[in-house]
Image: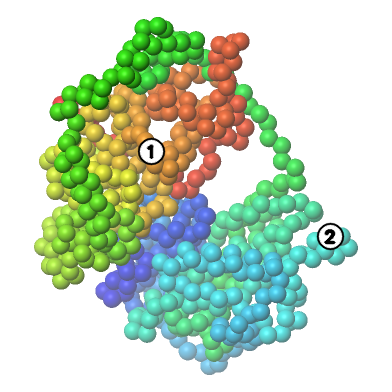
Amino acid sequence: MEQIKKDFEKYFYLEQKGEDLFTSTDFWKFGGSRGIFGGQIVSQTLAAAILTVDPSYHIHSLHSYFLLAGKYDKLIDFHVERTRDGRSFASRIVSAKQEGKIIFKMICSFQKEEEFLTEHQFEMPKVYPEDHPIKMKMKDRNTFLNYIHQEILFYNQAKMILKPAAPIDPEAFESFENINQKLTVDGKPRIRPPHTFNWVKIDEDLSKKPSQINTVFLACISDFCLTVTNLLPYTTGYNNQKIDRPMGVSLDHSIWFHKRFRIDDWVLFEVESPIMAKSRGFLNGKFYSKDGTHVATITQENLSRTKVFDDDLNFKIKKIHLTLDENSRIFFNNTLTRSEASTKGLEPNTTDIELFNKIKSAKPNEKLPIENFPTNKHLKSLEQSHDSSQKLPKIECIYLGKHIIRTWYTSPYPEEYSSSKLLYICEYCLKYMKSMYTFKRHYEKCGIRHPPGDEIYRDGKISIFEVDGRSSKVYCQNLCLLGKMFLDTKTLYYDVEPFLFYVLCEFDGIGYHISGYFSKEKRSVNGYNLSCIAVLPTCQRKGYGKLLIDFSYLLSKKEGVYGTPEKPLSDLGLLSYRSYWKTKISLCLNGEPISINEISKETAISPDDIISTLQSIDALFFNETKNEFEIKFLADNTKPKNDNNFIQINPKLLRWTPLVT
């Protein structure tokens, strides 16, 4: 049982917290799903039940219901109820809870294996073997198969491989050759049959693993390709209408395990949907081993919803009026009013012209005292220093945590380290080393498991630490050197004392793994709330960049001031900030009159950034007749786009007070 427990923790991230209590904090990201992939929840729940049953019992059936969508950033607790332990059968009821609510319920039955006088089964469908090339002549079929392969990319963590299969005798399956082809018969689109075949297996050697590992892997795979099959008749168009990609949600899921099998060898997965009614599709699935043995059967009912669009899309224009207080100091870092900042009608007078001509005709040594400028010797040394820094050998890769990451730019590590092609960095203290031997010795002795600062924010597995550049100087210098490998414009490496660093980490029960950071001055004369920001390549496309930007503005709101990033911004930085500003500003626009200052107070975004954002999208117009601004938005733009990667900061979870100096 101990080996099974270790395997479940390794492959399915399931940890035991009590006799009948298990938990998981890590989940696979599946396509565009708004919640955790159902197959992973099924497999984790089954694994929790197996760990409470004597190994002599083997799972033979499970029946389950999906009640709520699982959230990626919250842990799931699995509570097991021991309902029966008999001589031949045992049963368990498992409740998966997230934030105190039951999101999934399963009842499963186990049996000690018995033999009957005889056995029977229907013959396995005749399909081409997994290594047989499938000729795809039709454009739409290619599109469908590409979609399948795109989805399967998200199964890398599950170590799953999928290959579409085709029947040897297409006539045995009605219209199989047209399954992904747009046809019109008598002027109407032809329906594609909801019937698919796929070869599947796990890319892992399970020959020395207990049989329970195979059943849990199959439970995970059993939730794949179901919605796709169910909606095949409706994805090319119906009644001359364009249908957006439908949404499918699993309602209930059942599996019967008939015989033992190896999921690390190819298994045929046949799925068909005999009926779709009242937005609910019913599916049957069968698993066959390569020798034709029917090893498992699944059924599922899922809910399918979609939107139908006409050819012509009409958008309404929405006008929002903003009132401007002429006495508001919103220009030049909130120091000048509109009238004071206006240069309209200003022309140089006689005195201005005389002063300009006097300076223009002055001799070179009369411009400024020469001691205020660096000498030629200094300039030459600076140029040589700059050139030498550019000629530093580039460290090609770094080993950080469990990842080997290719670097983007040169970082001024000490010369003896810059000559290494691969640099080993401790993900906890950021100490850098040249050899794996030294790195392993350090890792065994390093007692640090989080950044050397205060944890000021935690939400699920995400934590943010505040690190003072003065009290943790070496760590912050190492952090800047690491960040320079992925930032072209960063120039701060060693002078870290005037800065605070906010380090974003992912927590997995072992330690806090660095994902990104941003820095800001302890006291900024210009009101900058962010000086530098970086997210490691292994953690990108998760929304961590916007999360850090959002967090910097949360700190500004806590301080009671407007915030703005240090200028000038890089091209990518400007795009990120414009996207963030547009999202936050749109949340404030509800059709009621609102001033720039009110938007600033609500978002902590500086008035200058608000105005520049509105101008960049051609949404801000000044009505000279009414002496007020007008915002003209498409109705669709007044609401922020759904961004699955935009993780919202929860202000209630912040534990922080502004720095007092």
* Residue indicated by mark 2: 188
* Residue indicated by mark 1: 569
Q: Provide the secondary structure element on which disc 2 rests.
A: strand
What residue appears at the point 50 percent right and 51 percent down from the top-left corner?
A: 34
Q: Quadrant of residue 330?
A: top left
Give the mark count. Answer: 2
Residue 177 sits above or below residue 309 on the image: below
User: Percent position (x, y) of residue 54?
Assistant: 33, 75
Residue 401 sits above or below residue 569 on the image: below
Q: Quadrant of residue 492?
A: top left
The image's mark for residue 535 is none
User: Percent position (x, y) of residue 68?
Assistant: 49, 51
Q: Amino acid at mark 2?
A: Lys
Name the residue at the right extreme: 186
What residue appears at the point 73 percent right and 52 percent down from the top-left corner?
A: 242
Q: Decide which of 290, 106 is in the foreground and name it.
A: 290
In the displayed structure image, the side of residue 547 where residue 425 appears, left or right: left
Residue 227 sits above or below residue 85 on the image: above
In the displayed structure image, the side of residue 661 where residue 109 appears, left or right: right
Q: Amino acid at mark 1?
A: Leu
Of callouts 2 and 1, the N-terminal one: 2
- Say few, some or many: other residues with alpha carbon within 10 Å of mark 1 (under 14 / 14 to 19 / 20 or more): some
